[in-house]
Amino acid sequence: MTDQSVPKARTPADGNAPRSPRTPEGVSRRALLGTAGATGLVLGTAGAAAGYTAAPAQATPLTSLGADRAMFHGKHQPGITEGLQARGHLIAFDLTAKAGRKEAAALLRRWSQTAERLMAGEPVAHGDTDVARDAGPSSLTVTFGFGRSFFTRTGLEKQRPDALAPLPEFSSDRLDKARSNGDLWVQIGADDALVAFHALRAIQKDAGSAARVRWQMNGFNRSPGATAHPMTARNLMGQIDGTRNPKPDASDFDRRIFVPGSGQPAWMANGSYAVVRRIRMLLDDWEQLSVAEQENVIGRRKSDGAPLSGGTETTAMDLEKTDKAGDLVVPVNAHARVTRPDQNGGAAMLRRPFSYHDGIASDGVPDAGLLFICWQADPLRGFVPVQRKLDRGDALSQFVRHEASGLFAVPGGAAKGEYVGQRLLEG
């Protein structure tokens, strides 16, 4: 967890698709999207979470929440710069014993075709489960990545990026190897839980005999429109989390987050590297602290995310400011101080996490925390130096535990007619 929010970047749905027999009335999910723009409905108005009810003559149009659509094809894969989504699923696969490069290519082709259809609000080509029958795309994104072991399994070791070197061990690690790493990684996000699950199920079915599930995790964020105005998300500790995220309109954003078009290896051009960490929050211990104590751990006010040195959430933190007793207003080991890019050689990463809650143990302790996902052009210059700094003295470390970890190479977006990873697997 670092002191870094993610901006919204969504594209309206395309309503020009032909009709299909998907609904009893003969109206496809995608065709329904075209009526959304004419209704005047916006997020936060009455009925904005209503979906639609079928009628013999016409269907109530989708609200903006259901109609929002991300694009599958593009320079970068979806699911990196889009805004936080209400529901997420992370799933890692290992190739089966008989699967190699040929089978992996066929699998990525299937997955890409399925992702393109689902992100457009269409059913999968074969055997659709109808879980998302009544919904629009709901900002669905599906993102694919390759783990270090994938290159050994497919005989592509010479194409394995140096940036996929194993992450070092950290003092807060209590890693479960069975829930870490993997040959292939898929990130699914949407603003509707059924749409997200529908995609998860389709991706799992598409794996067929080529790959088996290694681990799978479920996450969530606040639903769009749940606050009076857009704001940085809160985590399960109640803290505003994501204030200092790099902004896409910054001049150095692409350089920090994406591999350049001239980068090496060539197949990673316009791609990024995802570090995935399951971070357990020790909420019972955290909630025993007073609000003032929690704020000193983080270095920011709990109410509005402003630094303890004063101002608003976006005010630059004054690291030298002292109180009347001469003590630093922002404690020397405060999380927000330790993770500042200017305190870590300029190291920056784009955080795009999900919270998770996997139930309550027999002793009443919740299994809850953060599915931490960060994006960077090079994890050795992004995640690693920041986490090493946290290891050396972060007040938050006694309240969190890293229980799973993965590092994945996420290639650039697929052009029309291509599948994700085609330049690697057919190059």
Image (cartoon, rainbow, N blue to C red):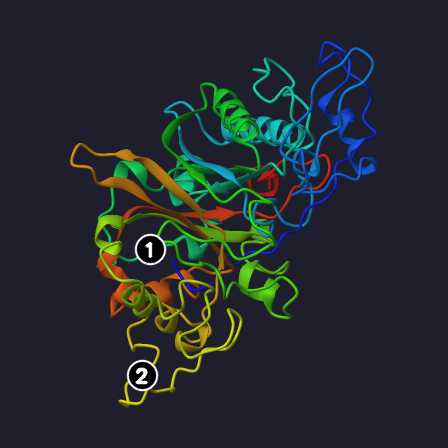
Sequence-earlier tag: 1 or 2: 1
For residue 167, the mark is 1
Q: Quadrant of residue 150?
A: top left
User: Which residue is found at the position 77% from the left and 12% from the top?
Assistant: 26
Answer left or right for 381 relative to 423.
left
Q: Quadrant of the N terminus?
A: bottom left
Q: Amino acid at mark 2?
A: Leu
Q: Which residue is mark 2?
A: 328
Q: Quadrant of residue 211?
A: top left
35 in relation to 225, above or below = above
241 in relation to 190, above or below = below
Q: CA distance from mark 1 to mark 2?
A: 33 Å
Residue 348: percent from left, percent from top: 48, 66
Answer left or right for 87 relative to 301.
right
Q: Amino acid at mark 1?
A: Leu
Which of discs 1 and 2 lies nearer the camera? The answer is 2
Mark 1 surroundings within 10 Å by alpha-carbon count, few (fewer than 14), some (14 through 19), many (20 or more): some
Q: Secondary structure at mark 1?
A: loop
- Of residues 248 and 210, the one drawn nearer to the viewer in this rendering: 248
Residue 34: percent from left, percent from top: 80, 31
